[in-house]
Image (cartoon, rainbow, N blue to C red):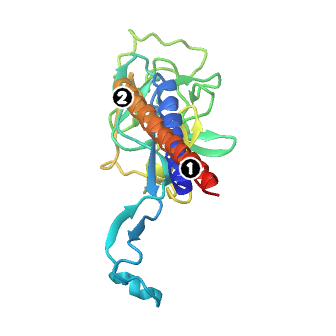
Amino acid sequence: MVRGWYTGASGMRAQQWRLDAIANNLANIDQDAYKRDMASFKAFPELLLRRMNDDGVYKQPFGSADVAPIVGKLGTGVELNELFTDFQQGALKQTDSDYDLALDGKGFFVVATPWGERYTRNGSFQLGKEGLLETKEGYPVLGENGFIRIKANNFQVDKEGKIWINAAIPDDPDVMVSRESNTWDQTELLDILRIVDFDLDRYLQKQGSSMYKATDVSGEAHTLDVAERPRVIQGFVEGSNVEPVAEMAHMIEVNRAYEANQKVIMTGDSMLGVLINQVSKLG
């Protein structure tokens, strides 16, 4: 009965982990390129129960118990195996902003931060004060040649991540460019977006704002060749891959499983109370 308490308590703790992951997913459902958290569990070793003193079979030495009739298996609880990120593709949302970029396929943008390179699929970018392509937090986006310096209405990004500028427009930050007058008769390759991937991306560490950090398990980032790159779509951003209906269904499932484990503990406590009371009467 006491073992039943520990088994039920481990089940309740497991459901708490699941509920925390679901709550975090629902809280970030509107975050661009957010990837949902998923919890996986593993069972403690099961105990194989056999009958004792059945026809005198269970005797010393202890190895003779192997031929005793089997009653069945007794579970001893579960524990959290890992909390990982599901990088399933999210839906693409059109924004019509030249600075917004979406990745259709596996891969990550590279961002320079004071703590080193970070990786993201959130392509909701902006033009910084120094003319750099930046995240909403002000971190520069990296191309294969370093920082990407652009000018409003004077750059285009193709599906391979190549950044083209109109060479006919003067390279002067004080000269305003009209989209209507930008004919793109003379184009020049400015840079190529640096897009990377990992051997085990599910083990990337979340850093907030849809950014990730490489870990020892995920492996270091490797730049993707043109043939391996995801499709880059300008004027779109990737939405989160959280399905609210599915998450709500999982939440109901968690609540029911939590209550079931709670009843196991209450039943074990009640049975132990009855046993103690009966023994005390016999004494």
As measured in the structure, the alpha-carbon distance from the residue carrying label 2 to the one carrying label 1 is 35 Å
Residue farthest along the front direction in this orientation: 282
Q: Nearer the viewer, residue 217 or 148?
A: 217
| Number of other residues with Cα within 10 Å of mark 2, as a class: few under 14, some 14 to 19, many 20 or more | few
Q: Nearer the viewer, residue 146 or 86?
A: 86
Q: With 138 as the anchor, is 77 left or right in this view?
A: left
Give the quarter of the image for residue 112.
Answer: top right
- In the picture of the structure, the residue carrying the numbered disc 1 is 272
Please state which amino acid type lies under the numbered disc 2: Ala
| Number of other residues with Cα within 10 Å of mark 1, as a class: few under 14, some 14 to 19, many 20 or more | some
Residue 73, image x, y percentages: 37, 63
Q: With 149 as the anchor, is 235 left or right in this view?
A: left
Residue 74, image x, y percentages: 41, 61
Mark 1 element type: helix
Label placed on residue 212: none
Is there any visible trace of residue 120 in the rendered image?
no
Residue farthest along the bottom direction in this orientation: 61
Earlier along the polypeptide chain: callout 2 or callout 1? 2
Give the quarter of the image for residue 166.
Answer: top left
Residue 23, image x, y percentages: 51, 29
Q: Is residue 138 above or below residue 120?
A: above
- In the picture of the structure, the residue carrying the numbered disc 2 is 249
Please state which amino acid type lies under the numbered disc 1: Leu
